[in-house]
Amino acid sequence: MALYDVTTDSTGTVDTDGAYGTLIKITDNIIAVAYMTGTGAAGPGEVKTYNIATDSVIDTLEFDGTQARYPQIFSIDSTHFGIVYTGPGNDGFIKTFSHSSGTSITLVNTNEFDTTLFFYPGYAEIDSDHLIVAGYNGSSEYDVRTFSISGAYVTAQIDSHTIAGAGTANKNIIVKASATKFVGAFVQNDSDVLLTTYTLDGSYNITNVDTLEIAITGIGIDVNVISIDETHFMVIYAINNVNYTIKTYSVDSGNDNITLVDTYNDATAQASDNSMVLLDSSTVAIVRRDENSDLDIDVVTVDGSYDITVESETILVTGTLNIGLLNSMVMLSGSTLAITYQEGGQPYHLYAKTVTVDMGVTPSSGNFISIF
């Protein structure tokens, strides 16, 4: 393998009826996947633990028998995880679960934290017992909220902050830059992308520090963000399903003054249904659905000035209907990544794939989690 080449290690089927899948790492070989079943825009929700080495299901739990749109699964500790999702009535829900190395998945707590509307949630871990969540609310606002997670794994809302003018049909992103600094992104109702930064105080109250609008000629879709370090982050998005764009930005030490650093654009490529993982301090893996509806993975680096280079582009899956829809990616160990993706017509099939990126040296392992 050459530097930044990507090879596929394994491919398996999580479910023959699964959409909106997101995943977390349990062990180097075991993942947990939350997803929606059924046809149409809404269906019941299931969470499944799956051994990627043996292509086998360990345990399955239906966590909502009515509706579980856009489920986002997050790790709490080695024996617990949570799911934030749009549930019955399009309300916002957080549920927590226990497990034992992937077996015996059990519901612990349910928190219906919004009884009006909460669409397309995103999340980031603050610390071991706090969570920050972003979504689209019933007042057409980008809505950011902090939550505590008690020793009994019960969640409770602490604070919220809203920004008017959110669009209805796009992801709402929130990512962690440091213990008290976060970056958000969403597509506005005028189709422009808005970047926003936040700080948290010692009581987990939210302060909006800065915003920056990225003017879009056309319709901006599928914005995503990853933190590179405490003062720099990377943004990707597409325009009208093409114009694959990557940008780097800087902020100052107070998470203020969002400033564009560099831009990469491919006007003929598509970058919808994307996910991002930080491989090391200067390397990002991006999985996306391309202009041919194939599932691609790109390896992107930034130099000391945070200028962007696309080092490799690899097609992982080609050809079938709706390949690479609504994918999610997580680091397992070293430079090995797990990816879930759906394909086909309804009911969709949900697949898991592992890939390894040649990094020249082995980076530090970790449970780096991406939105969507």
Image: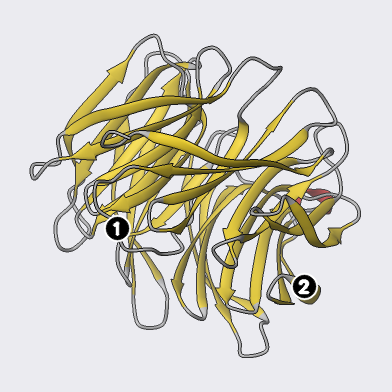
Q: Is residue 187 visible?
A: no
Residue placed most toward the observer, 339 or 360: 360
Q: Which mark, residue 103? A: 2
What colour-coding does the image apply?
secondary structure
Local SS, label 2: strand
Q: Residue at x 22, y 48 (%)?
A: 282
Where the C terminus falls, by quadrant? top right
Q: Position of residue 49 (x, y in %)?
A: 73, 61
Give the image quarter of residue 248: top left
* 274 sits to left or right of 279: right
Q: Looking at numbered disc 2 in the image, what kind of residue is underneath it?
A: Thr
Q: Position of residue 37 (x, y in %)?
A: 84, 43
Q: Looking at numbered disc 1 in the image, what kind of residue is underneath it?
A: Pro
Q: Separation of disc 1 and disc 2 at Cα?
A: 30 Å
How many C-alpha atoms fall within 10 Å of the one at disc 2: few (<14), some, or many (≥20)? some
Q: Residue at x 28, y 46 (%)?
A: 359
Q: Which mark, residue 363? A: 1
* 242 sits to left or right of 328: left
Give the image quarter of residue 303: top left
Residue pushed farthest bottom? 151
Where the N terminus falls, by quadrant? top left
Q: Position of residue 268 (x, y in %)?
A: 39, 9
How many C-alpha atoms fall within 10 Å of the one at disc 1: few (<14), some, or many (≥20)? few
Residue pushed farthest top? 268
* 137 sits to left or right of 43: left
